[in-house]
Image: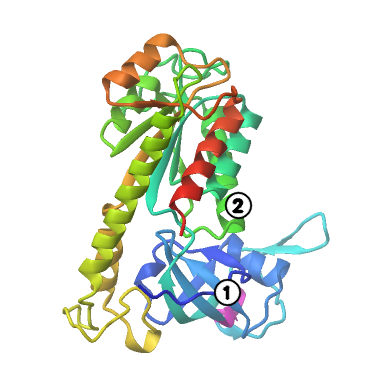
C-alpha cells in the first residue's frame, strides 16, 4: 500500500475531531498562542495537524482570526487581543484562531501496528514521569498507573476504595498529577511525531489491571525470576506474526477502495491517502480508520514497582493467561523495564 511521505520537520499540532474537516481546520487556545506568538509562523507556512487517531493533515496557514476584531482575518503581524504578559517578554493570547487550509492527508506512519497498553506499577512521581515520556516516544498506546502490593507510593485518597466507574478513589492532589502526566504525554507525542496522544488513565488496582488485560490479545509480564530467553523470543515472534497477518488482512480488504460517495470501486488504488480534490466522504473515511484500529493486535505489558511483584501477583497473572517473560539476565529498574520492552517491540514490529 502506498503512503505519501509528509515532511517530518514540520511543526505538529493536535485538534480533536478534525477528522471530519473537508478543506479547513481551525486551531485555537494554547496552540493558537504557540503558533502565532511563540513560533511566529507566517501565513503560507505549512504545519501538520493530527486528529489524535493516527490521521495526519498537511496544512498551510491561511489566516489568523482575532476575537477582538469580531473574527475578521488579520495579517501575519500580531494584533492586540486578550493577552497576558509572561516572564520572557512575550505575550500569551488564547482568544484567536488559526485558519489552516488542508493540502493533503494520510495515515500517520509512526504508530506501531499493535496497540501496546502499559500497566505500570506506580513508582515515585519523578520516575513515573520519565516512564511516560520514554514509552510514549517509543510507541505506547495507553498507560495505566497500577497500585500493586509492593508499591512504595500510596494513594492519599480513598484508602483503596473505588468510585462508581470502578477506578481507585484519589485525592484532588493526585487528580492534578494525572493532568500533569497527560501533559507530559502530549509533549512527548509531539516531539516524536506520534499520530495519537497516548492517554495516562486513572489509577487502578492490580486485580482490575489483570482482569482488563485478560480481555486483550496478549498479556506480557516481564519478571526477574522467569526462566530462559527462548520462550520470550517465541512470544515476541508470535506478536509480530499476528501483527503482520492483521495488517495484510486490512490492506487486502481495502484494495477495492471507496469512492467519494462511500461506494466500493476498483478505481481508487490508495484509499488511505487521497488528495482534497478527490476526498472520501467523512463516513467512509472514518469507518475505514475505525476498522483498521479495531483490527489491531492488542498487547498488555505489566511492569512491577520498585519493590517488585509479590508472588501471589505473578500467580494471578498466570491464572488469567499472562505470559511470564524475561528481559535478559540483568535485573532492571522499574523506570528501565518499560522503555526496554517498548524498544524490543518497536524494533521487531516497525517497518
Relative to 3, say whether 130 is above or below: above
- At mark 1, the secondary structure is loop
- The crowd level at tag 2 (other Cα within 10 Å; few <14, some 14-19, many 20+) is some
Name the residue: 29% across, 71% down: 285
Q: Which residues are magenta?
A: 61-71
**Which of the numbered marks, if any, corresponds to residue 187?**
2
Q: In percent of the image, x 50 and y 23: which residue is there?
A: 304
Q: Along the polypeptide, which appears first: circle 1 or circle 2?
A: 1
Position of residue 253 relative to residue 209, above or below, is: below
Label placed on residue 7: 1
Q: Position of residue 204 (x, y in %)?
A: 40, 26
Q: Residues within 10 Å of mark 1 (few under 14, many from 20)?
A: few
Alpha carbon distance from label 1 to label 2 = 19 Å
Q: Position of residue 178 (x, y in %)?
A: 52, 36
- Tell me the residue at 55%/37% (across/down): 340
**In the visual, does 59 lie left or right of 187?**
left
Q: Does the magenta-highlighted stretch encompass residue 64?
A: yes
Amino acid at each position: 500500500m502506498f503512503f505519501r511521505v509528509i515532511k517530518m520537520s514540520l511543526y505538529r499540532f493536535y485538534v480533536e475531531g478534525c477528522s471530519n474537516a473537508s478543506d479547513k481546520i481551525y486551531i485555537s487556545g494554547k496552540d493558537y498562542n504557540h503558533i502565532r506568538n511563540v513560533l511566529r509562523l507566517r501565513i503560507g507556512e505549512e504545519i501538520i495537524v493530527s486528529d489524535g487517531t493516527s490521521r495526519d493533515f498537511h496544512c498551510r496557514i491561511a489566516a489568523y482570526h482575532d476575537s477582538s476584531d469580531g473574527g475578521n482575518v488579520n495579517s501575519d503581524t500580531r494584533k492586540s487581543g486578550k493577552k497576558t504578559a509572561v516572564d520572557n517578554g512575550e505575550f500569551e493570547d488564547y482568544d484567536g484562531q488559526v485558519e489552516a487550509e488542508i493540502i493533503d492527508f494520510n495515515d500517520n506512519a509512526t504508530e506501531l501496528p499493535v496497540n501496546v497498553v502499559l500497566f505500570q506499577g506506580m513508582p515515585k512521581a519523578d520516575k513515573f514521569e520519565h516512564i511516560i515520556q520514554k514509552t510514549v516516544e517509543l510507541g505506547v498506546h495507553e498507560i495505566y498507573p497500577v497500585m500493586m502490593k509492593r508499591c512504595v507510593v500510596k494513594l492519599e485518597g480513598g484508602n483503596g476504595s473505588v468510585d462508581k466507574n470502578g477506578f481507585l478513589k484519589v485525592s484532588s492532589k493526585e487528580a492534578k498529577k494525572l493532568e500533569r502526566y497527560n501533559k507530559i504525554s502530549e509533549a512527548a507525542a509531539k516531539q516524536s511525531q506520534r499520530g495519537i496522544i497516548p492517554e495516562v488513565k486513572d489509577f487502578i488496582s492490580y486485580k482490575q489491571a489483570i482482569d482488563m488485560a485478560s480481555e486483550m490479545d496478549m498479556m506480557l509480564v516481564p519478571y526477574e525470576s522467569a526462566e530462559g530467553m527462548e520462550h520470550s523470543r517465541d512470544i515476541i515472534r508470535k506478536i509480530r506474526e499476528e501483527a503482520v497477518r492483521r495488517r495484510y488482512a486490512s490492506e487486502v480488504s481495502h484494495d477495492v477502495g471507496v469512492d467519494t460517495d462511500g461506494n466500493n470501486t476498483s478505481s481508487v488504488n490508495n484509499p488511505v491517502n487521497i488528495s482534497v480534490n478527490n476526498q472520501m466522504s467523512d463516513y467512509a473515511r472514518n469507518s475505514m480508520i475505525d476498522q483498521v484500529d479495531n483490527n489491531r493486535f492488542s498487547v498488555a505489558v505489566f511492569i512491577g514497582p520498585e519493590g517488585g511483584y509479590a508472588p501471589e501477583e505473578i500467580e494471578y497473572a498466570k491464572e488469567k493467561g499472562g505470559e511470564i517473560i524475561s528481559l535478559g539476565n540483568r535485573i532492571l529498574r522499574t523506570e528501565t523495564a518499560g522503555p526496554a520492552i517498548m524498544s524490543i517491540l518497536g524494533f521487531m514490529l516497525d517497518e
